[in-house]
Image (tube, helix red, strand yellow):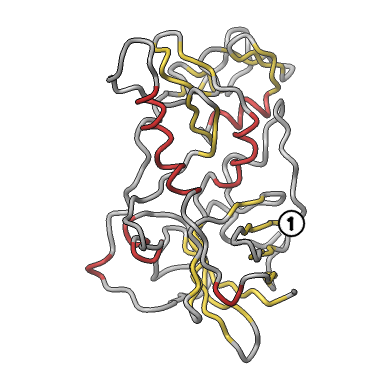
Amino acid sequence: MVLAAVAGFAACGGEVMVGEVDDADIGTGGGAEEGTGGLLENGAGTGGRPGVAVHTGGIGGVHEGGGAPGDCSEANEDNSAPHERWVSTPNDFGELAGTRWKETSFIPEEVLIFELDGTGRLEVGDPVTPVKELGHLDPYLHLQPGATLPLHGTTFDGSQLLVPLPERAPWEAWCSLQDPISDVGDPCVFGLRFEGDCQSDGACVADGRDVDDSWWITSSVRPCTCVESGCFAYTSWPEWEEGDTYADHENYYAIPTYRLTYDAASDSLKGGFFRDGIPPEGDPVEFVRVE
């Protein structure tokens, strides 16, 4: 299997530059979402096998106070704000709307899909349907076989295409199936789990629910943010004023990004995958139109 971006996001191959970058515009790579507390200890659960992560602080949001006792609306709003900004950022595919593009060298193949209605997605190999009770994909990788990444904030100016791909985007559908669990210590903190352990046979218990170790492992790397109403992919996404696009803020958030230039002669999109969002180093990629 060949995909440098998959193998721990390590950059390899030649240097790829797409567009000009002003050093003064390069930010600190910040933008980590606030309100995602919880600690993991490496070890075994009660009666469990070595190496299983035991959760001791909750995989969920942090309630910073405010509001009437028992009212979690402020905490819910704060913890869901980055995700809401992401999913509400429209795509602008321009003349590429209604097309599909396949990467020419990766195995499994990647397909960029730009729908006429403004929605889009990146499919890596054959899409895997998430199951609520089971783990989903490899939680330590990003662009991996079976992943489907919804697109938000993609822009095409007639020449350059920017496709931001937040790290936890592949778990958006899986997270939406999960039930938020409330922390007994703070009813306004929600997560996937707070107490539990795994046995040597792979059976796990999370807050009184039976799960398997694939679910446990997936939840251990915090793919989701949970609030009172449900769970969704953990997302860092910048704030911007109406009329701005991802291109106005890309340098200040370390969001993995495809930066591609349209080549009319070959009807292809050439450029690179940038693990930290911006040049100079990236993995060279080329997509060709298939529809």
Depth order, front residue of 218/158: 158
Residue at 60%, 88% (x, y): give it: 264
Q: Position of residue 62 (x, y in %)?
A: 37, 24
Is 98 or 25 nearer to us in this picture?
98
Up/down of 123 relative to 291, above or below: above
User: Is residue 137 left or right of 154 when viewed as pictured?
Assistant: right
Name the residue type under label 1: Gly
Whole-percent x, y for residue 157 in the image: 47, 76
Determine which quarter of the picture holds residue 244: bottom left
How many residues crowd around disc 1 within 10 Å: few (fewer than 14), some, or many (20 or more)?
some
Residue 40 vs residue 98: left or right?
left
State the residue position of label 1: 125
Q: Quadrant of the C terminus?
A: bottom right
**Residue 49 picture location, percent across and down:** 63, 17
Under circle 1, the secondary element is loop
Please tell me which residue is depicted at 35% across the width and 78% down the height of the picture.
Answer: 20
Count the labels in the image.
1
Q: Is residue 80 above or below residue 52?
A: below
Q: Residue at x 46, y 49 (%)?
A: 86
The residue lying toward the viewer, choosing from 228 and 116, is: 116
